Image (cartoon, rainbow, N blue to C red):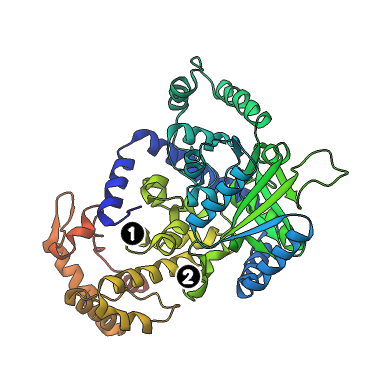
């Protein structure tokens, strides 16, 4: 991937110019967020559970090696096999080798951001194994040859008319006019795929260390079919998905669905503990769990960014983010988008490849407010900005390393003008007298800089003002208005 500043700006301009994408974003983001608000407003213990979820994740990450070892032992104790993958290439090799070893010709998959992350579909197809996404949104974007647009709604950007044309082109179907007809057409094809599948692949929402249980959360039932009909089930998980026990799982299930879709509970929650037992009527004969690192150890080792591994992939930060609501998922150039994508993608693929993403934020803090496990995304976006600038300017590295992770100071810069401006700003804000004097001078200057259609755009910040108007100073400051009222 390449999401440097030029490429990111190009993708954003394209998304903004696409009326279908903008209509979808204008509708979906507010709808999801309103549903989330309503779900938590009628759930008095919701805030306490968010705190509890944060604490469980923090404790688990602090002892992640022990929890993963417990998970592996538990999975093997119930008859499953565990495979460790250090990167995407190793994970692909493990899954392809397993599929070939079982003689699989057809694979059905449920929606999984982790398998998208490692490019698993392409690897399986390259090995001659038919691979079919069974979540409706994922199936649509697989037919279109695209990446997910949203964590929980991968085909959010597609209109009904676009899906109709896609089905005609790829499936040879007749022209279908309604969403119900399109869904039934996909259902008919996918049912046949389930019946003929040799192997099922899923992601993992949560993996319980003390029982070896994996939990898969969905709303369509396709994951349940993918895990119960084929003879072999392979689950692929990022190593941060482990949690200690079943009581922890109950906490996350209560806040995940509310944060993601505004539901009290997802339609299907499958808790899978190893392969099928002798007294069970359905389920796979073999179960394999692939535990993936792929950059997560780097995040874990970084005290400024470790918190990002608490993410439970609900998508709430995307729904509230003003940048995502205009740019859309594909502008971010990889699997993870929105504020969480802007934080973790540079660590997964390299900061030089994703240098624009941490700067694609207004730092309004809304993502932190809605996060079900209270991840401080704005703080980590600032940390990534400092790291990216330090990488590009070695003179900044020492200054960057001295900065506390809790600071919200501007990123160090070698540009003298920027440093001088920040020093003047700091000196002005530190003194009430200088603050009042600066306000008076700004009011005076605004009389000369005011022009038709807006305020004057200073040449030093023309890059900033290309997409923004410089706020025009009020004709009367708050202090002046207060003083006149007091008189």
Picture layout, residue 158 above or below residue 117: above
- Within-10-Å neighbours for mark 1: few <14, some 14–19, many 20+: some
Q: Name which residue lies at 59% across and 63% down.
A: 240
Nearest the camera: 425 or 195?
195
**Count of all numbered marks drawn on residues in the image:** 2
Nearest the camera: 34 or 70?
70
Residue of label 2: 298
Say which quarter of the image contains residue 193: top right
Say which quarter of the image contains residue 447: bottom left
- Within-10-Å neighbours for mark 2: few <14, some 14–19, many 20+: some
Q: Name which residue lies at 32% across and 42% down.
A: 16
Q: Compute the Cα span from label 1 to label 2.
A: 16 Å
Residue of label 1: 353
- Pointers 1 and 2 in contact (C-beta within 8 Å): no
Q: Name which residue lies at 20% across and 59% down.
A: 463
Pinpoint residue 408: horizontal percent, then vertical percent: 39, 74
Residue 43 can be seen, yes or no: no
* Mark 1 or 2, nearer chain start: 2
Q: Name which residue lies at 76% across and 42% down.
A: 283
Pinpoint residue 215: horizontal percent, then vertical percent: 70, 52
Q: Looking at the figure, which quarter contains the C terminus?
A: bottom left
Picture layout, residue 63 above or below residue 246: below
Q: Is residue 422 left or right of residue 146?
A: left
């Amino acid at each position: 991937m390449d999401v440097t500043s030029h490429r990111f700006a190009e993708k954003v301009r394209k998304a903004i110019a696409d009326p279908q994408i903008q209509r979808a974003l204008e509708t979906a983001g507010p709808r999801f967020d309103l549903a989330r608000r309503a779900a938590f407003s009628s759930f008095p213990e919701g805030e306490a559970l968010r705190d509890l979820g944060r604490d469980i994740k923090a404790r688990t990450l602090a002892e992640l090696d022990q929890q993963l070892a417990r998970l592996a032992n538990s999975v093997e104790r119930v008859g499953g096999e565990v495979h460790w993958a250090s990167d995407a290439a190793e994970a692909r090799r493990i899954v392809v080798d397993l599929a070939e070893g079982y003689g699989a010709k057809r694979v059905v998959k449920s929606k999984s951001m982790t398998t998208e992350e490692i490019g698993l579909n392409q690897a399986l197809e390259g090995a001659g194994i038919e691979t079919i996404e069974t979540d409706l949104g994922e199936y649509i974007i697989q037919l279109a040859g695209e990446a997910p647009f949203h964590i929980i709604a991968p085909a959010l950007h597609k209109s009904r008319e676009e899906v109709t044309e896609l089905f005609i082109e790829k499936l040879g179907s007749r022209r279908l006019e309604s969403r119900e007809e399109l869904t039934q057409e996909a259902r008919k094809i996918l049912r046949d795929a389930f019946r003929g599948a040799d192997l099922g692949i899923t992601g993992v929402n949560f993996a319980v260390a003390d029982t070896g249980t994996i939990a898969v959360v969905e709303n369509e039932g396709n994951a349940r079919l993918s895990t119960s009909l084929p003879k072999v089930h392979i689950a692929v998980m990022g190593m941060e998905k482990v949690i200690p026990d079943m009581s922890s799982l109950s906490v996350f299930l209560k806040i995940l669905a509310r944060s993601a879709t505004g539901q009290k509970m997802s339609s299907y929650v499958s808790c899978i503990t190893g392969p099928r037992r002798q007294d069970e009527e359905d389920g796979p004969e073999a179960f394999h769990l692939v535990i993936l690192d792929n950059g997560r150890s780097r995040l874990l080792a970084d005290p400024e960014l470790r918190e990002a591994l608490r993410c439970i992939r609900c998508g709430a930060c995307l729904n509230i983010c003003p940048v995502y609501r205009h740019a859309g998922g594909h502008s971010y150039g990889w699997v993870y988008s929105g504020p969480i994508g802007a934080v973790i993608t540079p660590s997964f693929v390299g900061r030089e490849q994703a240098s624009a993403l941490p700067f694609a934020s207004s730092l309004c803090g809304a993502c932190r407010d809605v996060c079900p496990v209270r991840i401080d995304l704005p703080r980590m976006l600032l940390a990534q900005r400092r790291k990216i600038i330090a990488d590009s300017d070695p003179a900044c590295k020492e200054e960057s390393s001295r900065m506390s992770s809790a600071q919200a100071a501007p990123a160090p810069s070698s540009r003298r003008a920027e440093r001088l401006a920040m020093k003047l700003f700091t000196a002005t804000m530190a003194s009430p007298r200088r603050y009042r004097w600066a306000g008076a001078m700004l009011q005076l200057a605004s009389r000369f800089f005011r022009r038709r259609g807006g305020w004057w755009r200073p040449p030093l910040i023309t890059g900033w003002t290309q997409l923004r108007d410089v706020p025009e100073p009020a004709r009367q400051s708050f202090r002046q208005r207060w003083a006149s009222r007091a008189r």
